[in-house]
Amino acid sequence: MKKNVLKAGVIFMTLLGVVSCKDEKEATAQKTIDSYVVYVDSLQNVAIADAKADWTVIDSSYQVRTSEAEMALNDLKESEKEQARIDASKSKYETFKSKVQAEVDATQAKSEEKVSTNQLLRDRLFGAGKIGEDMSFAWVNKDNILKTYETFFQAYKDNKSGFTREDYDEIKLMYEALDSRKNTVEKEGLTSDDNAKIASIKFKFAPMFKVNRIGAKSRETEAAKE
């Protein structure tokens, strides 16, 4: 009799342990899904610009949390309701993701447009394909540097009335890069005659550029007021 009582007690404790374990699993699963839903809801308060900057981290965290939430469904008796919550959160995330992607695409398009515009400007002033984004003048040497300055100066005079303020900023960078190359070329045998002609171009260009740049700024300011 005593043995039967002990045996029944062991069985009862075992069953209690199983039930307790199942309850604990369900509680953990519920917390996992609740955490997932809260995380997706919290993304709605994140500025699109901030989300774009941290998108890799956000999406990686989302993927992990989604996987954990879906696995947690296996530990729930009645999972239909929680499945619906997960699906709703997925839908919210996809909407949020679309907004971020739209911002990324717009930024990229703007960047590509700017690069394209700047490249057209470089081609116009120095010849097609002569200068890329790195503004390297490695092809300029003692034999062609005078011609390079002459081509640049003439092209500048021919187009200066159509340059925007941003164009002038880009031209300044190109001109400074060419001057930097000249410092190198001078040590490679640049003749004094060519050097003097380049100095003459630079003397004419500096004040012209300053006045034209101010003029472009004034035109854009006036246009903005209208």
Image (cartoon, grey):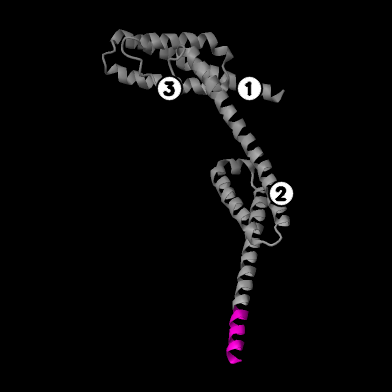
For disc 2, the marked residue is: 88
In the picture, the quarter occupied by the N terminus is bottom right
Secondary element under disc 1, as helix, strand or loop, is helix
Q: Say which residue appears at 62% left-offset and 36% top-offset.
A: 101
Image height of 43 relative to 190, above or below: below
User: Tags 3 and 1 in contact by the CB under 8 Å rule?
Assistant: no
Mark 1 neighbour class, 10 Å CA radius: few under 14, some 14 to 19, many 20 or more = few
Q: Sequence order check: which comes first, mark 3 or mark 2? A: 2
Element class at badge 3: loop
Q: Residue at x 40, y 19 (%)?
A: 178
User: Between residues 214 and 57, which one lies in front from this camera angle?
Assistant: 57
Residue 19 % position (x, y): 64, 72
Q: Quadrant of the C terminus?
A: top right
Dot 2 alpha-carbon crowd within 10 angstroms: few under 14, some 14 to 19, many 20 or more: few
Q: Residue 213, image x and y in percent?
A: 54, 20
> Which amino acid type is marked by label 3?
Met
Q: Which residue is mark 1?
A: 220
**Would you say the magenta stretch is mainly helix, strand or loop?**
helix
- Counting residues from the start of the chain, the first of labels 3 and 1 encountered is 3
Label 3 crowd (10 A; few <14 / some 14-19 / many >=20): some
Is residue 192 found left or right of 107 in the rendered image? left
Q: Which residue is mark 3?
A: 135
